[in-house]
Amino acid sequence: MLRSLGQVCFSGFLLVLLAGNSDGYQQFLSSSIFRALPQLITSQGGLSHANNIPFVNKEHDVYDDGLFSPLEDLSILSEAEFTHMSHPAFPHYGVRIKKTSFCDNSVKSYTGYIDIEARHLFFYFFESRNDPDKDDVIFWTTGGKNIHSQKYHYTLCPFRSRMLFVSGSIHGAWYDAIISDANGTKYFPESWNSNANVFFVDQPVGVGYSYAEYGEVVGTTEDAAKDIAAFVAIFFENFSKFKGRAFHMSGESYGGRYIPLFASEVYDQNARLIQAGLTPINLTSIIIGNGWTDPPSMVLSYFDMQCTAASVAPVIDIASCVRMKQVLPRCEKWVKESCTDLYDAMNCYAALQFCGAELAEPFAATGKNVYDISKDCEGEPGDLCYPVTAHITAYLNSTATRALLGVDPSVRSPYTLCSQPVALAFDATHDRERPGTPFHVAALLERGVRVLIYVGTYDWICNWVGNERWTRALEWSGREEFASQELRVWEVGVDSTSRKRAGRTRSARGLTFATVEGAGHMVPYDKPEEALALINRWIAGEELSPPYFGRFSTRCEIDATSMITANVADLSDKIFDFVIIGGGTSGLTLAARLSEDPSVTVAVLEAGENTIGDPKIAIPGQFGLTLGDPKYDWSFMTTKQKHSNNKELMWSRGKGLGGTSNLNFFVWIKPPAVDVDAFEKLGNPGWNWENFYHYSKKAETFHRPGKELTDLFPHIYDVDARGTSGPIQYTIPAHVHTVDAMLQKTFSNVGIKVLDDPYRGDINGTFIASSNIDPRTWTRSNAATGYLLPIQDRSNLTVLTEAFVSRIVFADNSDDQDLVATGVEFTQQGNKNTVNARKEVILSAGAIKDPQILEHSGVGRPEVLSKIGIEMQIDLPGVGENLQDHPFFTISYELDPSVKHPTLDSLKDPENAKEALRLHAEGKGLLRTGISSFTYLPLSMVKTPGAATLREKIEQEIEELKNTSGIAPGQREQLDIQLETLRSDKSPDFQFLPWPALFPMSSVTPGPGKAYMSLLGFLNHPLSRGTIHATTNDPLDNPELDPNYFEKDSDLELLVESFKYLRHLAATEPFKSGIVGAELEPGPECKTDEQIRDYIKNTVSTAWHGVGTCSMLPRDKQGVVDPQLKVYGTKNLRVVDISIVPLHIAAHTQVTAYVIGEKAADIIKSAYNTIP
Ligand SMILES: Cc1cc2nc3c(=O)[nH]c(=O)nc-3n(C[C@H](O)[C@H](O)[C@H](O)COP(=O)(O)OP(=O)(O)OC[C@H]3O[C@@H](n4cnc5c(N)ncnc54)[C@H](O)[C@@H]3O)c2cc1C
């Protein structure tokens, strides 16, 4: 007897809202908002025995001992009649299946029934359009109850405009075809079976073509889960070609309640399958679209949807919103107490009834579509706001369709959209407001089942605000990481012309939340392209919004040729809005940001090659490997340093896309706030810590380190201080922390403050720093991979490599106005070319090449230009002056061999190096090493006998310098700040770090099998100033580079004092017992101050942090650029890179270079009123 196929027309709220009908509204009040949601009905029959599936026990040998022969091949099925499948492990279950030509003839499709004794669930199965033998399997179901029919039609069936009637079997149609009228289906290109085999199950019993033979009762989702799990097992057992295939369970709307429970049952059933000798189901993920997963979050979010601009502009009147606002706290409290904290079915029901009515009543009066707040409700009440439902019903009621599908002849009731009896019966179970569904989601996540929650932003009834709230509040081990992320944009489209914004997303450790903008309750119907992109990326395991291009699908599988660069013909004599000289750290940051506006064109000229993907660059732990190699490194040499025993130093700088971010040592450090605020004090409004902090977070995405690290260093980061969606990926590297821990503890033992996060503007103390290494691939994340690769397809961005810029071209300047840069002259393969700039030329060639390019363009000090025979265009004496660097010394030790210190020394053995590379490919091993332990100290904390008197001496030297008659303009102001810094302790004077090996520049020969550590001591705020100038008019000659180390005595004396301080640390535990033997370098014989001075002078190294050669200072203070980074005397030439830093900072310089690129982009965008 069929009782469940009656009309399920749900009595209340939804229908009323859809109709915008005030009588109906009364009806709504008398029922509940929850009645709007699809529900579940099952018949009495299978519920009790479903809990006792008699899996064959191991004791009884294997399950199919003569009892079971799988069907194996779907192609043997008949189209005319059903084939019956069963399995001895599930004696109460059977499956009827037949082939069908319904919908899409380009794939094989099947329909049938899952028979659970007297209950029969109808299903469709569509093979993948791509590769059915390899592609994943997706299970799809959706809500029931009133929405059932309309719901899945709209959701699943991709009908479109002009009253198309989807069909392809509604559900099936969604995957395969659309029906353009009541007579037939039409191919639907965005079907979800494009890359997957897809099921649709028509459940619960009582809706669609599913039926029960005896009196049905309202069941629960928990009960239905058992039926679905059994069906899934029977299917995979019978069709063994799908066995072990990745399996995803998905659903929309009330599917938000079903799917977590269904998947949990499948997961738990696996244990029993294994016990019975069967193959477990490879449950890989669950996917919920516009889901009703957490009723409290959903109901309370109705306020946001109606009264704020969370979706569209507020849709109801202020008076109603104020009333709601006043009701909200009561509702939050009541719902929390009765539904969440301690579930009380009646009380929770009452709370949600009351709050639902209060919060939804005004919306009902608007006549808007509950499924799409941007639209009014259309059609007749029974159409549920979508008039096309009439066609759907007609098509499904046709005899021909039913015959094609194999609808059981005993299903005699007409196909209808609503069933009042189901709705009423369902209320009794309180299934809709039952809490705990999110707990199932959390449990699945903990077991490695990925979870995708997507939501159309126009949906009101199961809206994005509520879904975002519960996903962020979800309690699971990845909560903090997930919740701390900002939403970031995801896009669809294959290239820059087709690329468009699809929505926003956040993702961590298997949980992804995504909005689909402009879609309502039925995302695949409203936004088919976006929906397909979403599902394809998800099943492929790709990030929806890869922070970098996502090309490293496996570790270090980086395709060097993947970055397509331009040909010279694409630039020569062409015009671009912006021409950027130098594709380095700041230059690529700027190029990426400027080209975000598709209406502007950007060209980048980089002298080096496209080295993206080169393992010498990409794989960490190989410090210094590229230094001195002309392919990667400019390898500039300094002049003989007259205050440093005539020592000449090599100043490495990166050549190639990415610039120096290709060969730096990954240290990610932000300066102290006072150092950045000093820029502002020197005459640069807006260049302060607040803005620096903002732009640095914009540039970065922090990845939390693993538990082994947080156990070792308990308070090492504060997620609130870290960026979560920027292009540069960074983390605390995984190795070698025996040395780091030793030093951190030693500093702490001598009273140095341990910082819990060094990225908030205070780095005074000792801390564990991060590195710009992407822990997902353990590869370098830099300007090239982070900023450029993701946008390489932008048609408005042209990047030319091996293009050596010789000079900037200016327009004739007859009227003595500021100069206008019209382009850039460059050579490629020996040929001279010009590229033209419509708006601006931007110099980003780094602190060493910038002055030379300016001078060759006639901008600089008159005496420099006249010496090289270049006609002066702009008299700008600051060019190439004010050079400051961080010099450092090293002290080396051998480490205690009884402790296993996995230092980089072992890589000197070629066999170990080879093994390390092999391990790295598996995401393991020593090549994940970064530099982690840092200590920044002011002079006052350096407790040596000479430190106190030294301070007085430096103060005196500074005062004397200030009073020197020939002092360069601007120096006095800088010295004032340096004096303040010295006295205030807010900005540290020194930096110390342990190098987990002998430092590459050490003269000690390492012994085989031994482990070493070099301590490095840096000077942060040198008083000495150097210069960089062109000395010939040949652009290919390197400029003369004179850092003038130790020009001022104070610099050397400070290093001497810090040297003695570090040595004295070696007597403190655990450092003391962590080393063996005497100090290796310089060794105990280096004792007196004079000897130490000499050692430092002979061995001094550069930290490669040269800044200041195009200082951002007032013009009369020897500034080269103004606060907008515009070169004085020009209308449209800017400098954007580390050279603009006017006064050195206590930090490594790469973060600052990214910040300069980011800030410059906003300055330039606002100058042209382009998108911010
Ligand atoms: C060995 C080394 C280790 C370092 N380690 C760290 C570290 O661990 N942490 C940290 O914070 N900082 C570190 N730094 C410093 C930091 O990386 C740099 O300060 C920063 O990357 C500079 O960025 P930039 O944009 O100013 O210049 P760059 O990134 O050098 O960009 C300049 C670009 O312009 C190109 N170019 C130059 N001349 C021309 C021309 N004539 N025509 C066309 N193109 C041209 C160059 O090839 C280059 O690509 C390190 C530097 C070095 C050298």
Image (cartoon, helix red, strand yellow):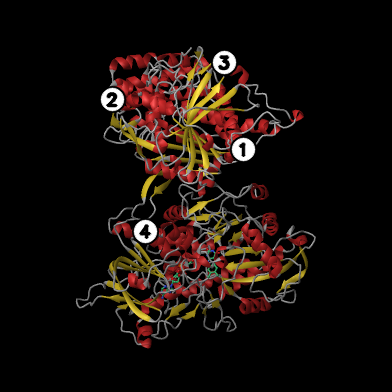
- What residue is pinned by disc 3? 45
- What residue is pinned by disc 4? 794
Q: Is residue 487 visible in the rendered structure shown here?
A: no
Instruction: Quote the CA–CA distance across marks 2 and 3.
Output: 44 Å
Judged by depth in the image, the label closer to the viewer, 2 or 3, is 3
Looking at the picture, how far across and down is residue 135, in whole percent? 52, 44
- Give the crowd class for mark 2: few <14, some 14-19, many >=20 residues within 10 Å: some
Viewer-closest of 1094 and 758: 758
For mark 3, give the secondary structure: helix
For marks 2 and 3, the one nearer the N-term is 3
Instruction: Quote the CA–CA distance across marks 2 and 4.
Output: 43 Å
- What residue is pinned by disc 2? 366
Looking at the picture, how far across and down is residue 520, in whole percent? 36, 34
- Which corner quadrant of the image does residue 13 belong to? top left
- Which corner quadrant of the image does residue 644 belong to? bottom right
For mark 4, give the secondary structure: loop
- For badge 2, the amino acid type reads Thr
